[in-house]
Image (cartoon, rainbow, N blue to C red):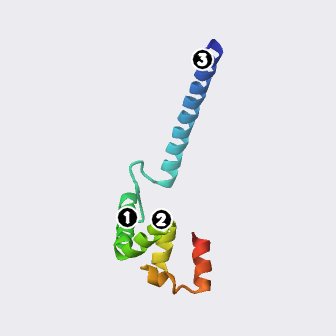
Amino acid sequence: QSFVERVKAIKEQQAKSRLEKKMKKLEKLWRNKSGIKIGSATSGGVSQLDSSSASKKAENAALNEAAELKAWLRSKEIWMKDLFSVLVSKGVNGPDDFFLILDETMDEIKREV
């Protein structure tokens, strides 16, 4: 590293530490005013970890329910996780159901994906 680059890096580091110090002070003031504690990672009584595991369970249930659809999408080389989840939410659980989709429903699916 050249001398100029080193001086620039030191200045950036000092600016970053000043900004972080200001942000911590601001957060402390905000927490005092709002009454929210530092360790609270819950919202509405359900922790973020629980909600993500609940969505994983729902995703796994959909995957098990529509395994035939997933295999068919992969065989046609059109597998997309978003497409799969939208199709399952619309009641498409297999390739036979896919061909029964109305044009209006297909437009909705295209917009969602």
Mark 3 and mark 2 in contact? Answer it, CB < 8 Å: no
Task: Identify the secondary structure beneath mark 1.
Answer: helix
Give the quarter of the image for residue 41: bottom left
**Position of the C terminus by quadrant:** bottom right
Q: Which residue carries the number 2 mark?
A: 81
Q: Residues within 10 Å of mark 1 (few under 14, many from 20)?
A: few
**Total numbered labels:** 3
Q: Is residue 56 visible?
A: yes
Residue 86, above or below 18: below
Q: Nearer the viewer, residue 65 or 55?
A: 65
Q: Is residue 91 visible?
A: no
Q: Residues within 10 Å of mark 2 (few under 14, many from 20)?
A: few
Kind of residue indicated by mark 3: Arg
Q: Nearer the viewer, residue 12 or 80?
A: 80
Q: Which residue carries the number 3 mark?
A: 6
Q: Is residue 23 left or right of residue 40?
A: right
Residue lying at 65% horizontally and 15% vertically, measured from the top left? 4
Q: Residues within 10 Å of mark 3 (few under 14, many from 20)?
A: few
Kind of residue indicated by mark 2: Lys
Residue lying at 57% horizontally and 87% vertically, measured from the top left? 102
Q: Position of residue 7 (x, y in %)?
A: 62, 17
Real-space Cα separation, disc 1 to disc 3, in angstroms: 47 Å
Of marks 1 and 3, which one's residue comes earlier in the chain? 3
Q: Nearer the viewer, residue 83 or 32?
A: 83
Real-space Cα separation, disc 3 to disc 2, in angstroms: 46 Å
Q: Which residue carries the number 1 mark?
A: 56
